[in-house]
Image (cartoon, rainbow, N blue to C red):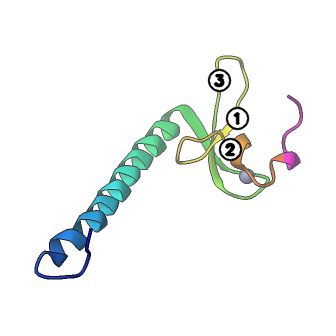
Amino acid sequence: MSMTNGQGELFESDAPTNALHVKEQTIQFLTQNMVRLLNQVGNKDFCKGCGEEVWYVKHKNGKCPPYTADGTNHFANCPNADQFRKKG
Ligand SMILES: [Zn+2]
């Protein structure tokens, strides 16, 4: 496929940019929904290991792990998880 040749260049170069933009909007939308949900089910706080904004959500099994705004269990992606991970 040719990129910048002739009159179709705008159409061709616009497509990927647009798709990326839509993807970013979707992620933003999902993150907003996740934050709304986390605000309802969890307690907002800051990670004691790295300072990131987290929500502590109580699980059925009684544990209360921190979640970040993207819905990820912060135990899994905190760079300083060792500082507050006590057991199991
Ligand atoms: Zn952290």
Residue occupying the point 35% across, 55% down: 23
Circle 2/circle 3 CB separation < 8 Å: no
Q: Is residue 71 above or below residue 2?
A: above
Circle 1/circle 2 CB separation < 8 Å: yes
Residue farthest along the front direction in this orientation:
1
Q: Say the numbered circle drawn on residue 65.
A: 1
Q: The residue under label 3 is which amino acid type?
A: His
Task: Assess whether residue 7 is covered by the magenta stretch.
Answer: no
Q: Earlier in the sequence, mark 2 or mark 3?
A: 3
In the image: residue 55, left or right of residue 36: right
In the image: residue 4, left or right of residue 64: left
Residue 15, horizontal then vertical, whole percent: 23, 64
Select label 2 or label 3 by which is in front: 2
Q: The residue under label 2 is which amino acid type?
A: His
Residue labelled 2 has its Cβ within 8 Å of some atom of ligand 1: yes
Q: Say the numbered circle drawn on residue 59.
A: 3
